[in-house]
Amino acid sequence: MASTPLSSDSKHGGHSHIINPWVLFFNMLWLMFLLVITFIASEFDFGNVIINNVVAMLIATVKAVFVIWIFMGVMHASKLAKIWVVTGFGVLFLMFGILGDYATRQYEPVSGWETNVPNNGGSAFPREWPPQKKPEQVGENFRPRG
Amino acid sequence: MAAIASDHGHGHGHDEALHHQFEDMEQQNDSYIVGMWTFLVTEVMFFGALFLIYTLYRSMYQLDFYLAHKVLDTRMGMINTFVLLFSSFTVAMSVRFAQLQNRMGVLAMLGITQICAGTFMVIKYFEYQEKFGHHLYPGPGFGSSPSYLNGASPNFAQLYFGLYFGMTGLHGLHVLIGMIVIGYLMAKWWRNSPMVTKDYIPTELVGLYWHFVDLVWIFLFPLMYLMPKP
Amino acid sequence: MSAIPADPNVTAVSATPRTETNYLNADWSIKSWLLTGDHKRIGILYLVTVSFFFFLGSIAAGLIRYELTAPAGFILESETYNKVFSAHGIIMVFLFLIVAIPAILGNFLLPLMIGARDMAFPRLNLLSWYLFMIGGACIMGGMINGGVDSGWTFYVPYSSMYANSNVTMVLTGIFIAGFSSITTGINFIVTTHKMRAPGMTWFRLPLMVWALYATGVVIILGTPVVAVTLLCIIFERVFHLPIFSAELGGDPVLFQHLFWFYSHPAVYIMILPAFGVQSELIANFARKRVFGYHLIAFSSLAIAGLGFLVWGHHMFISSESMYQGVVFSLISFLVAIPSAIKVFNWTATLYKGNIRLQTPMIYALGFIGLFTIGGLTGLFLGCLGTDVHLTNTYFIVAHFHYVMVGGAVTAFLGGLHYWWPKMTGRLYPESIAKWNAVLVFIGFNLTFFPQFIVGFMGMPRRYHYYYFAPEFQPYHIMSTLGSTVLALSFIIPGLYLTRSLTKGAKASANPWGAHGLEWETSSPPPTSNFLQIPVVLDEVYDFDPVTEHEQDKAAQALEVPSYLSNEAKSIESEKEKR
Amino acid sequence: MFSNFPATPPQASSFSREHDLIFYALLALTIIFTVMVGIGVIYFVIKYKRGSDADRSRPIYEDARLETAWSVIPLILALIMFYFGTKLFITMRVPPADAQEIFVIGKQWMWHVQHSNGVRENNTLHVPAGKPFKLTMISQDVIHAFYIPAFRAQMHVVPGRYTTMWFTPTQPGKYHLFCSMYCGTQHSEMGGTVVVMEPREWANWIENGGQSQATLTLEQSGERLYKQLACNNCHGAEDNMRAPSLYGIWGKKRTLTGGRSVIADQSYLRESILRPHNKITNGYSNTMPVYDGQINEEDVLKLMAYIKVIGSSVGGPSSSGTDTAAAVLNGTKGTMSPFAANAIQYQNSSMRRVDSTPTTRSGELAVNAIAAQQEAKGN
């Protein structure tokens, strides 16, 4: 049994489905194409920094899905493996709920002065911006605080 | 509990690749695949936490991160991505050859993968060297060549480079571990060990791991190298 | 009650004949132990090492309690005190609680309960023990080298910038021990999915297996997060990579988010297996199927799932957004419900049972009481308004000790007694064990109940001195007195269980007359667990209290103690000879 | 319970009552459920103990209605508690607009509090009853937590970001202030007292720069001491039978009994206060008591400062020289720079009462003292 190629013994190998090499090859080409798209998209302005980021991440996600689905063979894997893949990314998504804290902090009805500084993420250290107005800082490691 | 003896004990005891605790190869293969996937899920969570930290800080300090990221060489990142994608393909092919028990095919494909991994690490080395040369490694001497900061706040740029070195470093460590594991696997194939030749699963598991390394890079590359202008 | 807690149908039920070679005496060489792939031997290895760590952690606990009897301390410096409580926390959480029930009882029982020859990955299982040992050695190394004083929570920036350099070593140890848990978790999940005996459907699984499965899921999804979070501190300390550094604009609160994203589910890693043990004990000593089996099974999974959604309730006052606080509080209240269901179901299982008050059952009943208090006081802390006052005080210390010690440790002791005959093939002395179980309950309440009061009064946790608040002292003295009783009640089982290894009566395959695949094989089981893989045909916990009671009655009428089977009789006479 | 064996923290803020109501409601729930489960367990164990003749027929294994009941009833109770707890929490997190702001800095291992008018204190917090206060807090090093059990108020103090808490004290008294977030070696000693004062008392306190009474200059306290020790009974504005007047004495030549003469300088005055019998002014007898061992050096310095003021005036109190003295004593400080005045005040800090805080000493006034020095140097 062990001497015969596993492919001929479907019962033995269980889910050991052998993928057509051309599928793998075209998948690679497709991924490389998407990579070029990623690069082009990063140069292109869709009008909004959020949209730009979302587009970049969407393309990356599509790439990831193709790697998982075809290269990693989830396409032919058992249902259990599929469930685990989904669970893993699902809980990862849950973990990003941590960001909800930072997103909602600015709406807290506390009359603090840190909220007056936009885009500072609640950090008490004010950022000096724009930088071009600043004098040249040579050899200085840290910008003075406050 | 009224249990009766099962009639299928070690039915396949003669199969060299079958471990004693399993009933048959199907159960064993399935177990290994599921086990590997659960392990990969832990890896997803492992890198996921870092991605979370990165997402948060980048959303806080978008402009500084954007300015700091300009130092990175996108060409090198692109080349590395191509290399990793190609190595993913060769690993997938090696799994295919393992299923077909084509020993030379597996060795050739894994060999190419090793070369790709080596190329990746060499490019990474040059990238790191450049950053060190520009005093962009976080710590006391950070930013002593301010022109390389492109006007980003040295504090926030330090956060960016901290994450850059942390995440790409951990990814690089995974590549290194992958190289060692693939090397071990190649040695097994080279010596015609029944552990790999009679059973494609070890090759498949290594392949899954390698794809995961690729997967991490697929996200790292656009996040680190290709930031849209805020 | 006789020293042999036997059952009328012991010999009738044990299908597998007793074999002379078992997993313990198969090979005596040290190498055979250190290179074993046998889940039972790995379980025993864990038992030995974890007991050692529990001993160390308890000494630290004793020091803390002793020191706190005086408002200004009298044996330790503040710095030493901080190192002692950190050592207590780190050892107890990472080297005892997370490992105790899953790695000792879980490793030993999971394949036996589902009718498998071994775990799915025996070598991985052994690796997990070695990782645990390396991790433990690193942690111990850091402590011997001078100790860490950052507490087990390692909050930044204290741990990353202000604590001494031993933190790096201890964190490395925890990181490695984390991978030990991960490998155990992978093994549990794959084993439960793939290694079940024919006929062992999901709803024939003992509740212990359900609990271990849920534990595995939590380990897999949670542990890597804390691993990488702690790794970030190592990065910060060793490689100067600023990740949480507030000076550079990083956020120390983010560390807490990531830390509790694991460490809250980690609480369920500790308590879920305890639920499993508890269900086994209650069912087998009430001689009755667990009430609401499905609900308990699903509530295990519900707890595992919801456990990932409540990490923020550790951070209500740590500058977390108010809105998120409200959401987390709501989910925390919801997660209390599956736990409440379990308590009610265990109580209802007793109804119309045929209850035997043996040692494991006393532990199980104690568990119900302590866990009820521990769980309900959790509501005080999940409730936003009261949490503001009670968090970071002794109230929270008392609360989680009620859950962790009153819950997990009590269940662990109960489970250890229950499966002791299976693990060692020997019986422990029943009467002393029974009284000791009562002692644990009393000592525990004496120790931790006063802490609720002193916590409500506002005594912050991790305080060395309280000379400025002498009103706290009476409660600390009570607590220390209780802890002496508790310490005694932990030493006694150590002694009699060790003694029983050589002096104890030989156990039959099923000394409790219990139900479950692990009792089908001999005690101790052979290396391959079952001579032949069993096929499961009947339902889980298939007891019949009515018939049993009638049999008892009939036996009483004949004035022959029914539980003295021929085998047990022979042991009895042997004892008399001695 | 007993006053020396308390089991509850004092209620001293507007949150305390509501908090305790929720706490006791939860406590009641806890007791009810624990007793219920406890009685259930004990009853079942006794009734269905092995060998008992209880009816065991038709046992139930699953009962959807029962299970729903004990899932839903706790759920409803939990949601009720959630509602009240959340309501209180939101109140605690939303400071009223009229709350007065206090700034708190946590550092290893002390609390540094700054009131909005610049008064600083360390490890204490003085607040009046009946007025809302908002604390804006930040840490200099690690995470701390500002915790006042009597107020049921607690909040982390984080480096790099401001956190806020607020409260309205209600009950005057002294309460514990703790750092409840572990912060290092002396964590347990990072704390102090919260003093809740009557509003008027507090107004006085804050007005006087963090002391119950206005600070006195060295001269003023010397004057007080001069009267306290009854020096003025004999050493009045004019020479009299018992003793010579000290007005205008400073730097003058004094003739002693026996014909010797001395200049009335600091060392003479000091000796005359402590051991008056050594140098008795001509024409007077040795009637002054010996103060050596009776008053300390600090008091001597104060007296000296006062005597210097009155001694520098010419003639009696009505003469022009005393104007300066009166000006100094009344705190108008004449031509002194404000820095110098502060410097005097700084020197004088030992007069402070016990509830004054070290930072006042080392804080603003000290800074001004240094400034005065520098000013003098510059001149």
Image: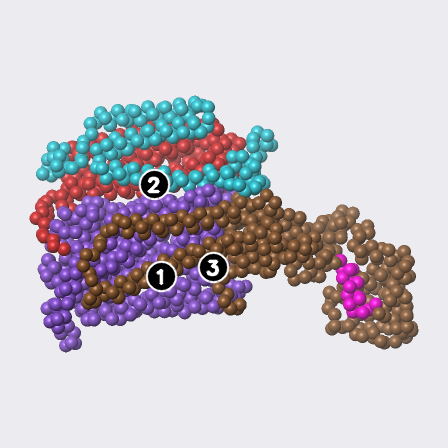
Question: Which residue ends up furthest to the left in the rendered image?
Answer: B7
Q: Residues within 10 Å of mark 3 (few under 14, many from 20)?
A: many
Q: Chain of mark 3?
A: C
Q: Colour of chain C?
A: purple
Q: Amino acid at mark 3?
A: Phe
Residue D315, by quadrant, is: bottom right
**Circle 3 SS class:** helix
Front: mark 3 or 2: 3
Q: Chain of mark 2?
A: A
Q: Position of residue A14 (x, y in %)?
A: 16, 37
Residue D241 is inside the magenta segment: no
The chain letter corresponding to brown is D
Chain coloured cyan: which letter? A
The main secondary structure of the magenta stretch is helix
Residue D35 bears which disc, if any? Answer: 1
Q: Amino acid at mark 2?
A: Val
Q: Which chain is red?
A: B
Residue to which mark 3 is pinned: C456
Crowd band around label 1 with a 10 angstrom C-alpha radius: few (<14), some (14–19), many (20+): some
Q: Select label 3 or label 1 by which is in front.
A: 1
**How far apart, in angstroms, are the residues tagged by discs 3 and 1?**
21 Å
Please rate how many residues cluster around mark 2, counting C-alpha atoms within 10 Å: few if below 14, some from 14 to 19, many from 20.
many
Q: Residue at x 15, y 39 (%)?
A: B198
Q: Give the number of marks.
A: 3
Q: Secondary structure at mark 2?
A: helix
| Residue wearing tag 2 | A91
Residue range highlighted in magenta? D217-232
